[in-house]
Structures are given as C-alpha cells and as structure tokens.
Image: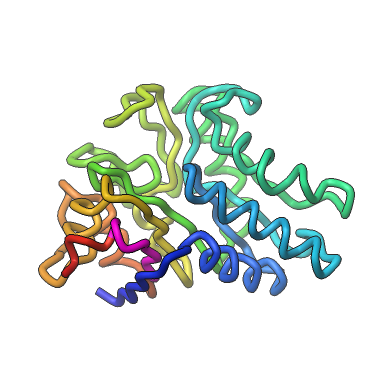
Amino acid sequence: MNVEIEVIDDPARACSAMLLSAVLGGGHVVLTGGSTPRAAYQELAQALRSIGRDLGGATLWFGDERCVPPDNELSNYRLAKDSLLDPLADLGPPDVRRMQGELGPDEGAAAYERELRGAGPPAFDLLLLGIGPDGHAASLFPDQDTLAECSRLVIGVPQAGLEPFVPRISLTLPALASAKQVVFLATGASKADAVAAAFGPDAKPDPHVPASMVAAAAQATTVLLDPPAAERLR
C-alpha cells in the first residue's frame, strides 16, 4: 500500500489545506459527508474568503450520497452546501455535480454514471473519504456485492450497512481508486479499530474492511488522523 499516515491535533485543518491547493489549481475534487469533513469545508470556505477567491475553476463531485432530497438533513450535498457552498455564494457560482439521491439508488446511480462518463470521465485530483467504525468507505460496506463491481463507475446501494439505514449511491472501488490523491479523514476513538484494520502495519485488502481495498488500489493515499483515531496504530 502506498499510504502516508499523519497524526495531528487538527486533521480537519490539514485537510482543508489540501483541498485549498486542489481547488486553486482548478482540479476535480470529490467531496464526502460527515462531521469532520464539515469542519474541513468550513476551514476551506474561510481560507478562500480570506484571499478573495471562490471555487471557480474547480469541479466538485461526490463520492456517495444518501437517497434523500438535497435539502434533507441526511444529504451529503446539503452538508457541503451549508458549510462550503453557501458561505461562498456571493463570490461566484461553483461547478458542483451532485448525486441525485432523490431518484433512488438505481436511477440515481445511472444518472451519475452518465454525468461522469460525459465528462471524460474526469481524472479526480483529490478524493476525500471518511472511514466508518465498520471500515466502510463512501457507501461501500463490508462484504457487500458492491465491492466486486468492476465495470461501472457508480452503483446503487439498496441496503446500507450502517446507520442511517437509507439506500445510497456510491462511486465504485475502481472509480474511488482512480483518483490521483485519496485522502482519508478520521477523528475520534470510535474509528481507532477501523483505522488499524485498514491502514495498520498488518493491513491488507480485505472485503470486511472496504477502506483497506481503496487504499490498496489507489495511486497515493494520505490518512489524516487525530491521536484518538490513531491509538491502535501504535
């Protein structure tokens, strides 16, 4: 595995710096959901405002989405909109390619597949992921058949393996691993076991720990952790 692990007090701030570099470079950036990414998006919005820049030139994609309307509190798009897009709305319209979760897992996945392929598909410059306490990444859950999908870029996930138990749409393993830089962001002791299983010295690609499969297949992976999340790596 080509994995670089950084244990720092404020991984969200470090993540925002990586996002800033990708955005200013006009890159294709893949966003994720979660409370720690929210903090990174807020930091990114503040950094862009401080230098008088918007998200123009960058294209924002999503790694997964819950099958809910975009204004639903469970929506990953809504999280990004509230924490990143809205604070910069007066500076210029961003190029945001959201997953249409409201279409349902199959139709929503097919629509996003068409959008990705219509764009090239794009070479993702930076792809941000969290890791669940069960080791899932994006909405690829342990031991599900979705992990074996090789021909599609996007897949519907009718049954989530972890709360909230709503259907999902997710980039497939090959699509996630195609990014030039994959960044995992994790904080808190509840993630320590999953982090060790996915990225520890004895980690190997394991369908029971989907994040390990992403890291093994990716060109380059950076794992940003706070000390509690890294506790089991010692």
Q: Considering depth in this image, is 56 or 47 the residue closer to the camera?
A: 47
Please give left or right for residue 156 compared with residue 104 in the image: left
Residue 148 visible (yes or no)? no
Q: Considering depth in this image, is 169 or 211 the residue closer to the camera?
A: 211
Q: Does the magenta portion include 126?
A: no
Q: Which residue is found at the position 27% from the left and 40% from the top?
A: 141
Q: Considering depth in this image, is 197 or 62 the residue closer to the camera?
A: 197
Please tell me whether residue 92 is drawn above or below residue 21 in the rendered image.
above
Q: How far across and down, in percent of the image, does residue 9 sit? A: 42, 66
Q: How far across and down, in percent of the image, does residue 182 sit? A: 43, 65
Please give left or right for residue 77 compared with residue 24 in the image: left
Q: Quadrant of the N terminus?
A: bottom left
Please tell me whether residue 141 is drawn above or below residue 175 in the rendered image.
above
Asked which quadrant contains residue 175, the reply is bottom left
- Give the residue at the far left of this rendering: 202
Q: Which residue is found at the position 55% from the left and 31% from the top?
A: 75
Residue 125 visible (yes or no)? yes
Q: Quadrant of the C terminus?
A: bottom left
Q: Which residue is found at the position 31% from the left and 63% from the top?
A: 227
Q: How far across and down, in percent of the image, does residue 27 sit? A: 65, 68
Please give left or right for residue 141 compared with residue 103 in the image: left
Q: Which residue is found at the position 82% from the left and 65% from the top?
A: 53
Please give left or right for residue 145 compared with residue 86 in the image: left
Q: Considering depth in this image, is 212 or 109 the residue closer to the camera?
A: 212
Q: Which residues are magenta?
A: 222-229
- Label total for image: 0
Please tell me whether residue 153 is drawn above or below residue 27 in the rendered image.
above
Q: Report the coloring of the rendering.
A: rainbow
Q: Does the magenta portion include 226?
A: yes
